[in-house]
């Protein structure tokens, strides 16, 4: 038991001193086992009888035994009480008679407690059956039933039965201690039973009491963290509602900023509470934490990259929820914007998820920024042959644009002639739109209006190649826009021989 030296005494000397002290105690006529107590010192735990020193369990002893000084001292004290009590208890007729009386009383009390315990258990079971479906209902997670009411009642009845059994065993344990302690010859057995339960219980209580300062520190950290997060939630909600304003801080930044602040507060609280954790100083805990840190570092590179990209996108105001944007080849409305991913809803009701890291490495076109101020330009091209006056074409394109919903009259639409090809002129109509979310519908209606305006004016929208070579084919303008006396042009034939000049003739 003694493995190290203390105060200049070797382990052997300490054992001899302890043996001498125990022999002196054995000579006491009225040995009281309750006077064997433990006393904490700077280098271990002492075992004393009243004011008489018996032994000390040092930190080195505990380390060699892979235990604690309190536990070693408690075990030693328990064995000492049992050994000395067995040696010094005389047996007389009066003590036996007193022991029998105490045993009878303890037996009657045990039977009464067992009867009361049985009735209490039956009453609880009856209440459980009565509350089935009322106070005791099924346990659900949304629509999924985790535990039915019958299953929950069955579990409660089992818990009640186990509780009865444990309580009855505790009563029996106390009963044995009382009965054995009533007879001098068996008092050492009573002490053995008592110490068997008290030593681990005392050790556990001492451990809990010793941990109380650290536990209180963790509790304070938790309470302060909760209060700071609650204040941050209130503050950023007020910023988001524009009840609190800061120059240059967009109210839409309030929610993502709160999320970042909350993560940092929780991370700081975890770091601050680790030294106070029950296993915070153990080597195994440090090794597990080191391994976990390596795994997180190796496996979260892309995750952290997406988070950083999401943060950059948030504070650069690249886009907001509901904006119509174009990322790469994908055009849609922003449905969700988180630190990890951005989700777009396309015109075909498709949800496209794009990692923020990919967005940061490509161009983002935001149609809604200018659309909200009515300055988003919608443009489309048509080709018209050189035979049509360009001023007339401009007028028709502008009229078609102004007839389109969500196209504003101020600023006025304008036309650009983007190319002069061999057979046609390329015209581009540019008109200002006030709703980027309706881009597809605006384009569709604009194209329809262009057809209507050109048909009404008798101007064909077609390939100039076909128009110049269609000889005898019907006009592509719808019949309701053609004159009533319209006839398809005749086919033109041209003949030529070697001896005469060419002559033209028409075939109707």
Image (tube, rainbow, N blue to C red):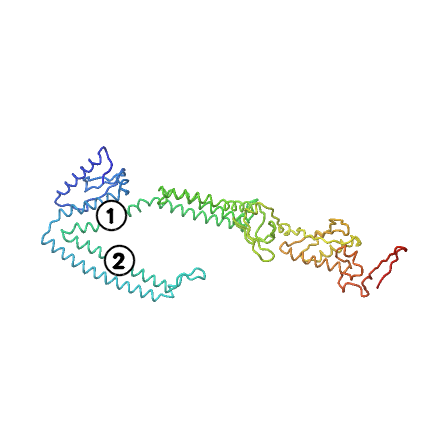
Label 2 residue SS: helix
Which residue ends up furthest to the bottom in the rendered image? Answer: 130
Which residue ends up furthest to the right in the rendered image? Answer: 500
Judged left or right of residue 22, residue 435 is: right
Quadrant of the image containing the N terminus = top left
- The CA distance from mark 2 to mark 1 is 20 Å
Judged left or right of residue 228, residue 55 is: left
Which residue is tagged 1? 199
**Residue 473 point in image, percent of width and height:** 78, 61
Judged left or right of residue 199, residue 498 is: right
Quadrant of the image containing the C terminus = bottom right
Q: Report the residue at 74% width, 55% height from top.
A: 397
**Residue 205 point in image, percent of width and height:** 28, 48
Tag 1 or tag 2, which sits nearer the N-term?
A: 2
Which residue is tagged 2? 167
Query: Where is residue 58, by image quadrant?
Result: top left
């Amino acid at each position: 038991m003694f493995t190290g030296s203390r105060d200049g005494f070797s382990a052997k000397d300490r054992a001899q001193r302890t043996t001498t002290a125990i022999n002196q105690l054995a000579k006491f006529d009225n040995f009281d086992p309750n006077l064997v107590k433990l006393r904490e010192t700077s280098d271990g735990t002492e075992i004393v009888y009243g004011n008489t020193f018996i032994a000390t369990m040092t930190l080195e002893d505990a380390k060699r035994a892979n235990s604690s000084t309190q536990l070693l001292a408690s075990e030693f004290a328990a064995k000492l009480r049992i050994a000395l009590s067995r040696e010094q208890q005389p047996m007389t007729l009066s003590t036996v008679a007193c022991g029998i009386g105490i045993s009878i009383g303890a037996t009657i009390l045990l039977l009464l407690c067992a009867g009361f315990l049985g009735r209490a258990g039956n009453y609880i079971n009856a209440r459980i059956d009565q509350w089935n479906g009322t106070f005791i209902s099924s346990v659900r997670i949304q629509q999924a039933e985790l535990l039915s009411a019958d299953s929950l009642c069955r579990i409660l009845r089992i818990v009640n039965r186990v509780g009865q059994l444990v309580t009855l065993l505790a009563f029996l344990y106390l009963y044995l201690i009382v009965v054995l302690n009533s007879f001098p010859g068996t008092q050492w057995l009573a002490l053995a039973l008592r110490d068997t339960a008290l030593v681990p219980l005392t050790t556990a209580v001492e451990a809990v009491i010793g941990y109380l300062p650290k536990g209180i520190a963790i509790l304070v950290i938790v309470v302060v963290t909760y209060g700071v997060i609650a204040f941050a939630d209130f503050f950023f909600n007020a910023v988001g509602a524009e009840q609190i304003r800061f120059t240059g801080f967009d109210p839409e930044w309030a929610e993502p900023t709160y999320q970042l602040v909350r993560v940092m507060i929780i991370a700081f609280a975890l770091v601050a509470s680790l030294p106070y954790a029950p296993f915070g100083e153990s080597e195994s805990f440090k090794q597990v934490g080191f391994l976990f840190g390596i795994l997180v570092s190796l496996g979260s590179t892309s995750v952290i990259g997406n988070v950083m990209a999401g943060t950059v996108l948030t504070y650069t105001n690249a886009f907001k929820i509901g904006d119509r944007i174009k990322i790469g080849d994908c055009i849609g409305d922003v449905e969700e914007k988180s630190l990890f991913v951005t989700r777009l809803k396309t015109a075909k009701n498709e949800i496209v998820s794009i990692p923020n890291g990919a967005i940061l490495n490509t161009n983002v076109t935001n149609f809604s920024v200018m659309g909200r101020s009515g300055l988003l330009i919608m443009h489309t091209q048509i080709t018209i042959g050189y035979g049509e006056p360009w001023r007339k074409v401009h007028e028709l394109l502008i009229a078609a644009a102004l007839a389109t919903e969500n196209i504003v009259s101020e600023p006025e639409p304008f036309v650009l002639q983007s190319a002069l090809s061999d057979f046609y002129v390329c015209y581009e109509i540019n008109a200002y739109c006030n709703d980027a979310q309706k881009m597809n519908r605006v384009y569709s209606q604009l194209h329809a209006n262009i057809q209507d305006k050109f048909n009404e004016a008798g101007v064909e929208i077609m390939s100039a190649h076909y128009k110049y070579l269609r000889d005898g084919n019907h006009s592509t303008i719808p019949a309701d826009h053609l004159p009533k006396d319209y006839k398809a042009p005749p086919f033109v034939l041209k003949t030529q021989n070697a001896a005469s000049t060419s002559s033209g003739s028409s075939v109707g």
